[in-house]
Image: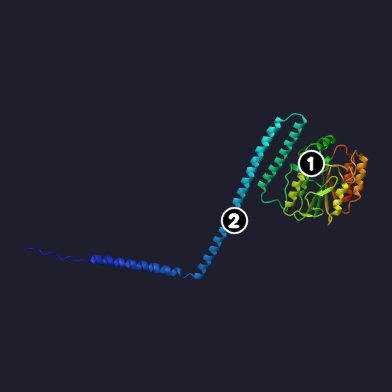
Amino acid sequence: MARRRRQMEVFSMSFLDCMSCGFGAVILFFMIINSQVVHESDNPPELAQAETVKLEFEILEQRKNLVLARNTMDRLEDEQVRAEDRIAQIIALIEKLKEELVKHDSVTLAKIERVEKLQSDIESLEEEKKRLLAMEKEREGEGNRVRTFVGDGDRQYLTGLKVGGDRILVLVDNSASMLDRKIVNIIRRRNLPDANKLRSLKWRQAVASVDWLSAQFPADSQFQIYTFNTEAKPVLKGSENVWLDVGDGKQVDEAIRLLRRTIPEEGTNMHAAYEVISNLNPAPDNVLLLVDGLPTMDSPEAKRGMVTGAERLRFHYSAVDTLPSGVPINILLYPMEGDYYASIAYWLLAYQTGGSFMSISKDWP
């Protein structure tokens, strides 16, 4: 007899137990999540919103600071690269000039002039290199000074010389005697081309002195620079009897640039120089006079010829009588051979006006 097959059941007890446990676990999981959500929602929404706004402001501020820092770094890097390139060019040019200088050791007149030119060029390049190095280290500026001048060691300053004031007048002697300290060299250089006259060490020293003095001008002051020989005239054309603002230094820089191109020539007429002090309105409260000796004439039409020491002294006192009172005269004297009365005469002038007197050495500034 055939055995009856057992009928198969799909839903057994074991399967139902597993399904029940699974549903129970899901329900428990949702209960836990719901309780956590309820706990988080208990915090006030205003507090969370305030914290969010605060964080957004902090993020925005930090982004601004980051952009400013990046811009500053880019600018400083560009300036550093330009300064390094210029320094490298100057160093290479200095080395080249030094090599040329070694080859020119003859005592002939032409070669002596060449050597003097090379020496002057090297000094100028050395000064420019020092300026660039100083700018590299102190790029953020130097106090209230409008301009800078890098000197050699302790020659960066002068004790007792007043270079400040509200209205500063600089009078620069550009007569032919500013070509050299010795009379024979003055006569020789007077007949040389203009380019050779501009390379005269004495004249370059006088221009460098004005450059140093102008670097000490207060930023809120006014200035004027005149040159004088037979007559006096401002370095900046069209600024006769007008005070110029030191300001950002652009006018001062332009005046120094033009002064470097001014050629020393003719005689010395102190009447013309002192008339500038009287013509300026308001009057200067500080005068800086750069001169190398007593005047050789008392008017532009004076006859040329040999002038004795006594005559030069008489011309000096005649010009001093025209000076207005109350204006201090600070004198920088570049001594010249044979002018023995100049030191005492100009010292007395500085003393009487309440200024200072200095006899400049060959290596200043």
Q: Position of residue 138 (x, y in %)?
A: 67, 48
Q: Is residue 327 visible?
A: no
Q: Position of residue 221 (x, y in %)?
A: 77, 55
Q: Is residue 106 visible?
A: yes
Camera-side residue: 295 or 217? 295
Q: How many marks?
A: 2
Q: Quadrant of the N terminus?
A: bottom left
- Would you place residue 218 above or below residue 108 in this image? below
Q: Secondary structure at mark 1?
A: helix
> Type of residue at label 1?
Trp
Give me the residue at 35% from left, 67% from top: 28
- Would you place residue 165 above or below residue 128 in this image? below
Q: Position of residue 64 (x, y in %)?
A: 57, 58
Q: Is residue 246 shown left or right of residue 26?
A: right
Q: Quadrant of the C terminus?
A: top right
Q: Is residue 180 shown left or right of residue 91?
A: right
> Type of residue at label 2?
Leu
Give me the residue at 61% from left, 48% from top: 78
Q: Which residue does the numbered mark 1 point to in the structure image? A: 203
Crowding around mark 2 (Cα neighbors within 10 Å: few <14, some 14 to 19, many 20+) is few
Camera-side residue: 31 or 296? 296
Give me the residue at 61% from left, 45% from top: 81
Give the CA separation, mark 2 to mark 1. 47 Å
Q: Which residue does the numbered mark 2 point to in the structure image? A: 68
Q: Position of residue 145 (x, y in %)?
A: 73, 51
Give me the residue at 93% from left, 44% from top: 314
The colour scheme used here is rainbow
Q: Is residue 165 shown left or right of residue 312?
A: left
Q: Secondary structure at mark 2?
A: helix
Crowding around mark 1 (Cα neighbors within 10 Å: few <14, some 14 to 19, many 20+) is many
